[in-house]
Amino acid sequence: MAAPLQRRALWAEGLLLLLILLFCIFPFYWMVTTSLKTQVVALQSPPAWVFTPTLANYWEVLFEDRVGFALINSIIVAVCTTTLAVLLGTPAAYALARFEFRGKQDLWFWFITNRFVSPVVLAFPVFLLSRELGLRDTHLALILMYLTFTLPIVIWICTDQFRSIPRELDEAALLEGASQWRIFRSICLPLAMPGVAVSSILSFIFSWNELLFAYILAPKAAKTAPAMAITFMEGYDVPYGKIMATSTLIVIPVLIFALIASKHLVRGLTMGAVK
């Protein structure tokens, strides 16, 4: 009697997982298939499930609408922001995890509350500041802006990673004559790599997908791919195929990056659960 009930529970669990999987995948399926349709087919009602695919939308956005140029800008901004956030964030996280100093709790509270402020509130002051400093429409303006919210992410995650490393390792290395920098670089940082990988992925994704500041700070020369995609929706004629082709091109690098780092991502996200 128990075996049939257990089998039914497994079937129900499998069916539930399948429904959740379909629910998560369907938007991507719709995005990719729409990118392969002409404007006439994309506007059909009811939707055309069987159609002749075309790459015309990809050709137009890449070679006529300069989306390829915007993707290069996105890569430059996201990679530079992530690199700087990791280079600055990991030593800061190590200091917060290992040392006691005046203002530590206030600094930690500021890092935690940094993301509480709505980006819309900062939009106008940031616009004026970038214009006064002559940074508007430059990669540097976006990198500095994105660093303000990716750096706290790196510090949050890596601080917990460094706290999980036994202090006895530091003490043993000190007795052997190692400097504090050597302990950080050669002992603690390699052990904290899962957390560094997770924070890097999140920083890259946030920088890659950000739209508001990209639209305000980089209208032409440094325009990123998300800001380019939204310009297609100006006017009454919305080119669904071109928008979906651009969206697909935006998603592909993030998927590749996440797949490459998936081993560290899973390990980093589950480390706290098994600690």
Image: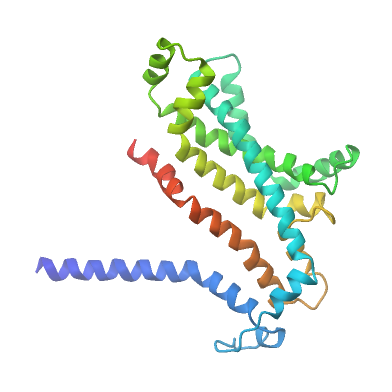
- In percent of the image, x 50 and y 24: which residue is there? 184
Q: Is residue 144 above or below residue 229?
A: above
Q: Is residue 143 left or right of residue 33?
A: right
Q: Which quadrant is home to the N terminus?
A: bottom left
Q: Nearer the viewer, residue 63 or 168?
A: 63
- In percent of the image, x 55 and y 87: which residue is there? 49
Residue 256: x and y in percent read 54, 58
Q: Is residue 9 left or right of residue 222?
A: left
Q: Quadrant of residue 92?
A: top right
Q: How is the image coloured?
A: rainbow
Residue 146: x and y in percent read 69, 43
- In percent of the image, x 44 and y 45: which residue is there? 264
Q: Is residue 63 above or below residue 256?
A: below
Can the viewer see residue 211 in this picture? no
Q: Is residue 8 above or below residue 86?
A: below
Residue 167: x and y in percent read 40, 20
Q: Nearer the viewer, residue 86 or 48?
A: 86
